[in-house]
Amino acid sequence: MTKIRLATIWFAGCAGCHMSFLDMDEWLFELTKHVDIVFSPALADPKEYPDNVDVCLIEGAIGNEEHLELIQEIRQKTKIVASLGDCAVTSNVSGLRNKYGSAEPVLERTYFELADLQPQLPYDKEGVLPKLLDRVYPIHEVVPVDLFIPGCPPEADRIIAAIEPLLQNQQPVMAGRKMIKFG
């Protein structure tokens, strides 16, 4: 039996979706019979996103240049891209800064107006932090998405119901309140 190559990642988000993923508890043992986890900040520490990934569960929104580069690489190397959680689906809390029109007012307030010592941008020093994009994007506004799993965070049962059909090479049915409820 060929195992599915599964990846998970989070961008601008809180890691709550990964906590729900881990809340699948004993079902994780069943999952490991069908998948090889090839990339996941919650379960492994690879440095490079691998080739030939079957499914990638993506938590969080696209908020900086590093996210933008990586999501494009993920889309090129992955058969099924799934937005996991409300931040990935809508930009949710991460997207609150969008109302200011660009990253500059947020950076000004955070790193200059509220600074106690040495007001400066964190990426003024090369390689410290990636540069923020002017707005935060849900995943589907940057690359095509194959599956949306909303929730903040989605419950473990919803994640299982979305993943389980993929293990049998079937499309999950994302319908009804249990599967598509936000928040």
Image: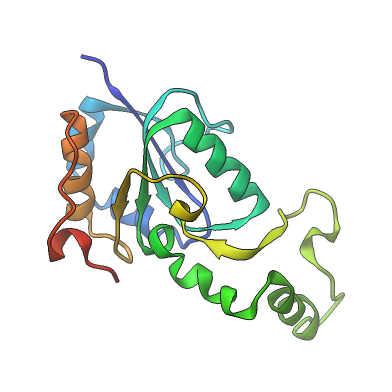
**Residue farthest bottom in this picture:** 113
> Percent position (x, y) of residue 183?
29, 71
User: 15 above or below 76?
Assistant: below
The mark total stands at 0
Please state which of residues 98 and 144 is positioned toward the viewer in this rendering. 144
> Percent position (x, y) of residue 175?
15, 57
Residue at horizontal 50 percent and vertical 31 percent from the top: 76
> Percent position (x, y) of residue 66?
65, 48
Which quarter of the rendered picture does the N terminus lie within?
top left
What colour scheme does the image use?
rainbow
Please state which of residues 142 and 104 is positioned toward the viewer in this rendering. 142
Residue at horizontal 59 percent and vertical 49 percent from the top: 67
User: Can residue 36 be seen?
Assistant: yes
Residue 4 occupies quadrant: top left
User: Can residue 45 be seen?
Assistant: no
From the viewer's perspective, tell me whether residue 98 is left or right of residue 90: right
User: 178 above or below 106?
Assistant: above
Residue at horizontal 25 percent and vertical 30 percent from the top: 32
Please state which of residues 43 and 155 is positioned toward the viewer in this rendering. 155
From the viewer's perspective, tell me whether residue 179 is left or right of residue 138: left
From the viewer's perspective, tell me whether residue 165 is left or right of residue 17: left
Residue at horizontal 47 percent and vertical 43 percent from the top: 41
**Residue farthest top in this picture:** 1
Residue 92 occupies quadrant: bottom left
Please state which of residues 159 and 114 is positioned toward the viewer in this rendering. 159
